[in-house]
Amino acid sequence: MFGSPNSHGANAYAKVGIETGVISASPHKLIIMLYDGAITSLANATQYMKDNDIPAKGYSISKAIAIIETGLRASLDKKAGGDIAVSLDALYEYMSNRLLQANLNNQPEGVIEVQNLLRDLKFSWEAIAPNNNQLNTDSPPPPIDALEPRRTTLFKA
């Protein structure tokens, strides 16, 4: 009875938090967020496989493939990135194909393989961050004092 409105409110709150994080993130942080999203989707997919929830499994794997293809792979600059970008492009293509096969054949080992590859890439990406202190997601942001006056910026039309 009370679960639906509360979960809707929590989901809306989480969505605002994600959107705010995307808006304020550096390009480097955005890539890390894409890795996190794909990794989380694949963790969900393996759980849905265990639960035999085929529609949810398919949705989670499709979401991870979309993140890999339209987020990570599409953001590659093969001219500026050279051989590394070309290799990443091939790896992302492999991951998408592997996930497609894992989905069709209900193979959790394929999902786990890609999840591990994404984790390795994420850790490598974090290691080359321009400022490693900004990417530390383990420490919470400083607390906000709700009563402290906020600086406002006024724009004239």
Image (cartoon, helix red, strand yellow):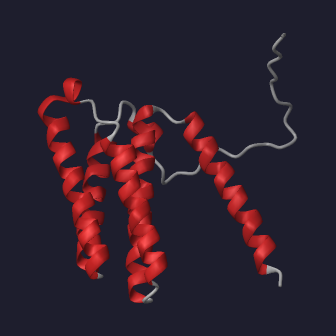
Q: Is residue 112 visible?
A: no
Location of the N terminus by quadrant is bottom right
Q: Indicate the quadrant where residue 79 lies.
A: top left
**Going by the image, does 82 lie left or right of 142?**
left
Residue farthest top in this picture: 156
Please, is residue 118 above or below residue 29 in the view?
A: below
Q: Is residue 76 visible?
A: yes
Please, is residue 15 above or below residue 54 in the view?
A: above
Residue 130 in the image: x percent, y percent? 36, 30
For the residue pair 142 and 33, the one nearer the viewer reads as 33
Total marks placed:
0
Residue farthest left in this picture: 83
Residue 109 in the image: x percent, y percent? 23, 77
Please, is residue 125 above or below residue 50 in the view?
A: above
Location of the C terminus by quadrant is top right
Residue occupying the point 28% across, 67% down:
100
Residue 66 in the image: x percent, y percent? 40, 54
**Going by the image, does 145 lie left or right of 118?**
right
Q: Indicate the quadrant where residue 81 lies.
A: top left
Please, is residue 11 above or below residue 85 in the view?
A: below
Q: Indicate the quadrant where residue 151 lies.
A: top right
Residue 91 in the image: x percent, y percent? 18, 51
Residue occupying the point 29% across, 76% down:
104
**Going by the image, does 114 lie left or right of 150?**
left
Residue occupying the point 45% across, 89% down:
51
